[in-house]
Image (tube, rainbow, N blue to C red):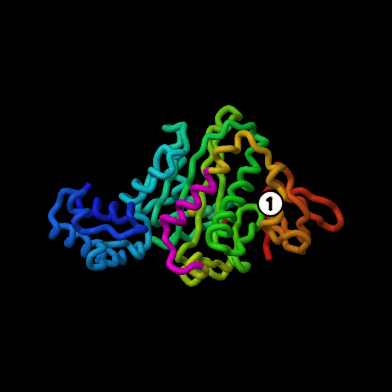
Amino acid sequence: MNSLQQTLILLYQHQHEYISGSYISEQLNISRQAVWKNINQIKQNGYIIESIKGKGYQIKHFKKGYEESLIHEFHKQHPFYEFIHFEDVVSSTQNIANELSYKYSNPFIVIANEQLEGRGRFNRRWDSSKNLGLWMSIVIYPKISLERIGPINLFISIAIIEVLRNEYDLQAMIKWPNDIYIDDKKICGFITEGQFSQNELHHLTCGIGINLFQDSDQLSNQFERQITSLNNHVEDINQYEFLNHMLNYLTKYFEIMDSISFEDYKDKYISYSNIWGKEYNFLVGQHSFIGIPLDVTNQGELVINHDGQHVTISSGDILS
Ligand code: BTN
């Protein structure tokens, strides 16, 4: 690793305080002149660094997109994951995660700054423009029976909602099964893909896409759905801090999900969604119909009132 990257890592490690040029020069065993050159280069790369005489330097704003060296540094805070595989551009983090999944048996993460073939549920396109979002796949190896896989989706949605509500004070809502909305606009979608061998779950790949700086005018399918982005609601996003919150909340559920039951979290889930009792158009396969969401089962299915009958659906979309 060169001294430029090392300087950036020092600034990242001390992001909540100022560090002096002499401290950096001592730590990295480089001249003050070299420190100064590195700081200037980091600024040119898009970071905002404040320098105050007598105090030193502090990062005030990160450049958009994740940086490989900082991701590796960041990983030290999350030892639950064996590694974080980072690439600037990929087809889809889901593909990379699935390819790697048979080589490992402990959870790991794949993150990219851009996906050329980002995909959503039902193989729909997921726009993942460069540096404008968190495009991440997490591979986990839960030792659970098949019927306990469904609720994992629900736990993921609870975790994402808790990040947005608790850490950013946003009224985020779950739209069953896999969407997160703010002000009736989608900010996040996720998919959970399972790979099985001999009827046993080998691993799950949880792909999460969150618009950090991406808005509907940047999307190819802007007419299809209304979307929003975290930067419409939060000033000056620090994408590492956001990732840190996401992993803190998700990991909490991943760690305990072999032993917990969704039943104990159902009230929470219900309260994080505002679909209950309202009439919606549903799309299940090719079939569209009207119904009113009533409840969610412990397996993660939605119970709706359709023409006076209670119908349970395990997959599909709630249209407007
Ligand atoms: C949906 O809304 O239908 C789910 C979207 C999931 C997008 C994420 S971005 C990271 C991961 N890689 C992909 O190709 N898809 C998921």
Q: Magenta segment, principal secondary structure? A: helix
272 relative to 93 in the view: left or right: right
Quarter-of-image position of residue 117: bottom left
Is residue 247 shown in magenta?
yes
Identify the element where label 1 is drawn.
helix
Quarter-of-image position of residue 145: top right
Residue 233 x %, y %: 52, 69
Residue 44 x %, y %: 24, 66
Q: Nearer the viewer, residue 142 or 14?
A: 14
Q: Which residues are magenta?
A: 234-251
Give the vertical position of 224 relative to 82 (above or below). Answer: below
179 relative to 26 in the view: left or right: right
Residue 219 seen in this snapshot? no
Q: Residues within 10 Å of mark 1 (few under 14, many from 20)?
A: few
- The residue carrying mark 1 is 268
Give the vertical position of 82 relative to 21 (above or below). Answer: above
Instruction: Check the image and name the residue furthest to the top.
Output: 198
Quarter of the figure that contains the C terminus? bottom right
Name which residue lies at 44% across and 56% down.
241
Mark 1 lies within 8 Å of ligand 1 (Cβ measured):
no
Residue 49 seen in this snapshot? yes
Quarter-of-image position of residue 109: top left
Residue 211 x %, y %: 49, 62
123 relative to 80 in the view: left or right: right
Name which residue lies at 46% across and 69% down.
235
Instruction: Check the image and name the residue furthest to the right.
Output: 308
Residue 131 x %, y %: 39, 61
Q: Amino acid at mark 1?
A: Lys
98 relative to 71 in the view: left or right: right
Instruction: Check the image and name the residue furthest to the front.
Output: 54
